[in-house]
Image (cartoon, coloured by chain):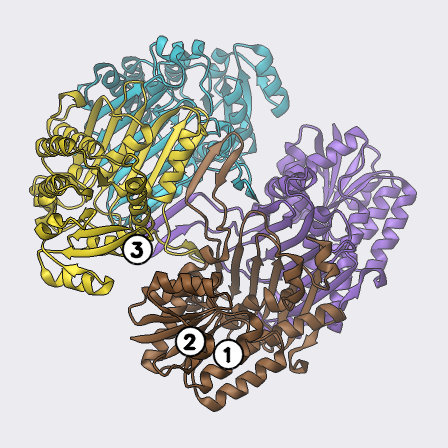
Chain colours: A brown, B yellow, C cyan, D purple
Amino acid sequence: MLNIGLLGAGRIGMVHACAISAHQGSTLCAVSDVFEQNAAALATQYGAEVRSSDEIIADPSIDAVLIATSTDTHSDLIEAATQAGKAVLCEKPVDLSLARAKACQSAVSKTGKPVMIGLNRRFDPSFGTMKAAIDAGEIGASELLSITSFDPAPPPVSYIKVSGGLFRDMMIHDFDMATFLMGALPETVSAVGSSVVDPEIGAAGDVDTAVVTLSYADGRIAVIKNSRRAVYGYDQRVEILGSKGLLQAQNVLENTVVKSTTDGVMSAKPTYFFLERYMPAYAAEWDAFVTALTNGTDMPVTLEDGVNALCLAEAATQSVQSGAPVKLADVG
Amino acid sequence: MLNIGLLGAGRIGMVHACAISAHQGSTLCAVSDVFEQNAAALATQYGAEVRSSDEIIADPSIDAVLIATSTDTHSDLIEAATQAGKAVLCEKPVDLSLARAKACQSAVSKTGKPVMIGLNRRFDPSFGTMKAAIDAGEIGASELLSITSFDPAPPPVSYIKVSGGLFRDMMIHDFDMATFLMGALPETVSAVGSSVVDPEIGAAGDVDTAVVTLSYADGRIAVIKNSRRAVYGYDQRVEILGSKGLLQAQNVLENTVVKSTTDGVMSAKPTYFFLERYMPAYAAEWDAFVTALTNGTDMPVTLEDGVNALCLAEAATQSVQSGAPVKLADVG
Amino acid sequence: MLNIGLLGAGRIGMVHACAISAHQGSTLCAVSDVFEQNAAALATQYGAEVRSSDEIIADPSIDAVLIATSTDTHSDLIEAATQAGKAVLCEKPVDLSLARAKACQSAVSKTGKPVMIGLNRRFDPSFGTMKAAIDAGEIGASELLSITSFDPAPPPVSYIKVSGGLFRDMMIHDFDMATFLMGALPETVSAVGSSVVDPEIGAAGDVDTAVVTLSYADGRIAVIKNSRRAVYGYDQRVEILGSKGLLQAQNVLENTVVKSTTDGVMSAKPTYFFLERYMPAYAAEWDAFVTALTNGTDMPVTLEDGVNALCLAEAATQSVQSGAPVKLADVG
Amino acid sequence: MLNIGLLGAGRIGMVHACAISAHQGSTLCAVSDVFEQNAAALATQYGAEVRSSDEIIADPSIDAVLIATSTDTHSDLIEAATQAGKAVLCEKPVDLSLARAKACQSAVSKTGKPVMIGLNRRFDPSFGTMKAAIDAGEIGASELLSITSFDPAPPPVSYIKVSGGLFRDMMIHDFDMATFLMGALPETVSAVGSSVVDPEIGAAGDVDTAVVTLSYADGRIAVIKNSRRAVYGYDQRVEILGSKGLLQAQNVLENTVVKSTTDGVMSAKPTYFFLERYMPAYAAEWDAFVTALTNGTDMPVTLEDGVNALCLAEAATQSVQSGAPVKLADVG
């Protein structure tokens, strides 16, 4: 039974608290948050204690910490926790700064402690099934990957300004998905973006609609489409063409009801909230972390994976600014 | 916060224990089972005590009991618990004997205690959406209901022999669904059945494949199809035609992956186990029970609903034996 | 090259004229109709002559006639044409009277001339694929067949009165589909019907909504659902459960466009008109007739098939009137 | 009634001959082909005469010619036919050379004769429905267009060598579809391509897999994916995201049968041949040509549209070679 400390009791921290408690191999012992009442609510619900993050990290009875705090604290907390001998599951991204993330990676490697980055979509049942089918050769050699990832609605412009931009904040999941499914990093990143959804986002120096093309050394190609607004829901689709077929992961719908009237044949919308869409993925992610820790096997998603995703985001950011393709080797 | 005693720690009891614990308005206090190790395992996992069912029913600190024991004990336990002043959620069916179920209904009514029968499918998100759409007039006046309900594989013949037969054991859910969606009981029940899946089932005096037609006083018609074997999974579909359209609830699939090859376009199968299929329904059912109890409102599924479903099963059993339609008024 | 005479230039005659002309093995030579301008229009379009049906039947240069006249003339024309040595493709039904149809069958058998009945749905690409899959054992032994067949809108009550009733006029196609897919006739027919769509139809002595259950000697069951009104289009679905799987033929939609908005995910409706829905079936039906005639092989749909469908319609009509199952052997 | 001369009696010429004959407003009078037996076969089937293309163009009784000859003859024949006073429907592309196509456009403009280019996909029922929905504002302002266009199998390398390359030969349809749906030309074209399907195609100087991103002046983006090989069939999908929703045109399947077994849920494949997929589009295209000619209205697809598609293909070809985005204004 692993004793777990949770750093961060916000929206995503609540999801993790539930997964930690429901797992037969882990117990939620302590919770911290900059807003103490958030921590207190979670602690009460799950029979844990409220402490500061420093106290949790210093407590030798805590086996692992789950970092669900704000992005700017991730690197520092990862370093502190691993140096204190703890295993870590940290929400993505490692850091908005690629240099800082790499420094963190270096610092962690000296501790030898296992760190997993919460690129949770790898644990989605459909994407996982897709990966297994690719690895099993069910579509032969993979050739062309397409990822469609639209948010239901843009965040406030105030958030956009501190988000690191669409590529680091939103498409980072898709960059990791590309690496996960293609099993390699691309050579070249070519990005196009604009702010057709909301000119205020453009005024804030970001894009809200983007298409990024990734070219791999062996000729394979991936294309990622992002939009900050799909009014019908959270649109998360992946497809990959191979020499022997096509795999598609389609949207998860709110229910299975179909209504046929004189207007047409109406189905339910995709689930709207990312937490609802990826709830099974969060549970499976936690199980994978506990299993790896218990068995002493490699973490299924590493700090390097987190840095790689950030590196691709950096390349895309440079490409959309310069209007030219960027070699990944030239980044960072 | 309601204190709950769980009677029965088998497969379905485990599902209920999880729902009780996860609900913010209820606590699992005590568990009983004829096999004490079953009760002990659940009690340990959720921090409850192991007790006998008599002790649980007698404990004044317990607000409500959830009865998930074997069918032949349902009526007795419902009566005992309500007479002890407890609210009850009891798994279907009330009893295999219609007469006994009616006697139970009569006994309970004297206690004035609320009893809900676990006809869980009413709480399935898709069927619930369908019911709401019907009530909102989205398909106008309802006319023709069809329920397809196939199990993935037949139970052992030893179970068949004590099950009460397909109509009481399996189609009872569909009879209740018909009543739920049509909002009325039929006048006439006409059943056809055979044992094309397994002649052993026929030799045991039961059918494994059946079609039942329900005729309502206002001319509406419902048809229910059951099979004990659909090798591709648990097939649970409902559709209803109205004057302004058609509503269909389709199957829940294991995942959303679609694979296109030279063989064809392959999607995932329907979920195989009824517990997986109806897991959200069990959670919603428990929430509805807690809410009704907390608010002092009527139970959303009553003992009368349970008796009505049994009554339809009795009529269908008579019809398939006589080869002629049976008037519901002539049953029981 | 077969020389063809077309009797009847109404809506369905126009469809056949097109199929006859487009086929490389047949030429449309002559057209008759009780309204001469109908015949003239078709004759002009396809370079044929306008003649009376008597003249066409008497013309030794005509190899075959296609009978697309009103139902009450079918039997007489089939007899006259076969006695004049012609092959015949006649629209369904053979006759509204089972006795008359059987007399026609007897008369034709004496001529030895090939007669095909236009039960066109057997030639629908999806139903044909389904039949081939059943015969190839792809779902093992068939067990339970379901046919859903809804018209978009009821015909005028004036037509209902002379139609022979829903079972002979509309469900006759579904009876034939059941025989086609099950490869046998049922022992027992059990029908339930009402006029929930339009009480005027009930006042005219007919039903507009019906469910018929067919029981086969070997325990298999088929259920047919008909409604005269499905406002969303022509709903034509078939599914069959077997020991190794399920086959479903779904609706043909007007197009493949899907629109996702805040309202939901909207697809196109099923095609509305039966001629549009079954246009490929009419072409394939004609090709099958020409091929059988050219090769001297058996007609793929026989006069006996037409009589059998009528027999089932007769049984269903009796069952809905008596409220009891009818043995097919007791009919006709 | 328009008298039509058909130049070219190959595979696509046969499709057009059928459409011309079936149309109530046109008659196929004469057919030419470099292989006279091809012309003879079509002429016999449809009651037309075999002539040389020069004879057809010179015949004053011919109202219009349909040019379905090899690509290298298109420009010359368009010029000759229009100078002889004929209306023209010419298969795409106008020419492989952008300069030659522009010269042809200039020459035709002096004749004042109507020329339509056979960019047939605009007439596909689903793409047409999509265009109408966009124009009707059903998804608000369009933002992000995606076109997936995969051939079932690559052509012989010998064809590849004379094809003008993937962008001019295959993606030209998708460039036109982008212009059709976006209602504008892009500013910038950015292409990535490789030969992962067959290195022989790469050795021949072409790509077999490509992704092209189009950036529009107003910030909108389109992305086109092409592959020469999708073993499951002809994959033709389009989707467009707008401020109020998403429109998708999905594949046309061979039939509507779905088979559920222990292996999964299997549907039919997309239609394999482009002629089968777009047969309704060819008929609608011809009808649009005849209607425009008869009514004296503008051609629905112009020579300028053909030149624009070629211009985009030229830009993509340059982009994939240079590895950098290309401004459309810098092309041609």
Instruction: From the top left corner, tell me how far across and down residue D41 is, in percent.
Output: 63, 43
Instruction: Please report, as a chain letter, where disc 1 is located.
Output: A
Depth check, front residue: C167 or C87: C167
Depth check, front residue: C89 or C154: C154
Separation (CA) of disc 2 from disc 3: 42 Å
Depth check, front residue: D183 or A27: A27
Q: Quadrant of residue C315?
A: top left
| Structural crowding at the residue carrying mark 1, measured as other residues with C-alpha within 10 Å and reported as few (<14), some (14–19) or many (≥20) | many
Separation (CA) of disc 1 from disc 2: 9 Å
- Asked whether the beta carbons under mark 1 and mark 2 sit within 8 Å of each other, the answer is yes
Amino acid type of the residue that numbered disc 3 sits on in the rendered structure: Thr
Instruction: Please report, as a chain letter, where disc 3 is located.
Output: D
Q: Residue furthest bottom?
A: A110
Up/down of B131 relative to B252, above or below:
above
Instruction: From the top left corner, tell me how far across and down residue A40 is, in percent.
Output: 41, 64
**B35 relative position to C63: left or right:** left
**Mark 1 secondary-structure assignment:** helix
**Mark 2 secondary-structure assignment:** strand
Residue bearing the label numbered 3: D262
- Asked whether the beta carbons under mark 2 and mark 3 sit within 8 Å of each other, the answer is no
**C93 relative position to B63: left or right:** right
Residue at x 58%, y 85% (from the top left corner): A103
- Give the label on residue A65, or none: 2
Residue at x 17%, y 49% (from the top left corner): B68
Amino acid type of the residue that numbered disc 1 sits on in the rendered structure: Leu
Residue bearing the label numbered 1: A77
Amino acid type of the residue that numbered disc 2 sits on in the rendered structure: Val
| Structural crowding at the residue carrying mark 2, measured as other residues with C-alpha within 10 Å and reported as few (<14), some (14–19) or many (≥20) | many
